[in-house]
Amino acid sequence: MNTADDIMSLNLAVIGGVCSSGAVVRVLPSTETLVQLQVTTRVEGQPRSVPVSVLNPPGWVEELDAGDEVLVVGQVRRRFFQAAGTTASRVEIEAEFVGRPGDRRRRATARRRIDERLVALDD
């Protein structure tokens, strides 16, 4: 019988695409900054819009606009909130890393983060 410690667990999302709209910046009551992005990817030629949230991002992320390319590494999260008097939910990628695909140094950082998460499966 497997115990909770024996079961593999991995929540890793990696997407690359273009912002379909500008970044939405909110300052939370905790004074942390939350940036929300809509990143459009293509799967078998079909566009897929993926919501991405970035907590306390580097300043340049707040300035992203429609058409800007990004590479995102994070985890899938389902968030619940109140809307119109009812509980609603949203599935999004909670970003650990956001970079520009053309930046070799940032791509290397993204690869390291991905590798660290995959190597942790072996531990």
Image (spheres, helix red, strand yellow):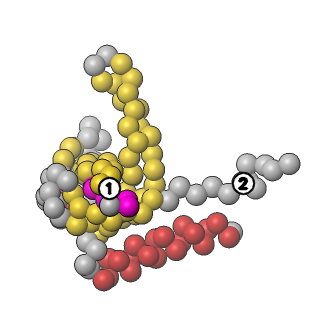
Q: Residue at the spot x=39%, y=32% of the render?
A: 89
Residue 57 picture location, percent across and down:
27, 59
Other residues around mark 2 within 10 Å, as few (<14) / some (14–19) / many (≥20): few
Does residue 44 show up? yes
Residue 119 picture location, percent across and down:
60, 72
Other residues around mark 1 within 10 Å, as few (<14) / some (14–19) / many (≥20): few
- Looking at the rendered image, the disc whose residue lies closer to the viewer, 2 or 1, is 1
Badge 1 element: strand
Q: Identify the image quadrant of residue 118.
A: bottom right
Badge 2 element: loop
Residue ID for mark 1: 46
Magenta part mainly helix, strand or loop? strand
Give the spatial CA distance, label 2 vs label 1: 34 Å
Residue ID for mark 2: 7
First along the sequence among labels 2 and 1: 2
Q: Residue at the spot x=26%, y=41% of the render?
A: 28
Residue reaching furthest to the right: 1
Q: Give the range drawn in magenta.
A: 39-44
Q: Identify the image quadrant of residue 107.
A: bottom left
Amino acid type, callout 2: Ile
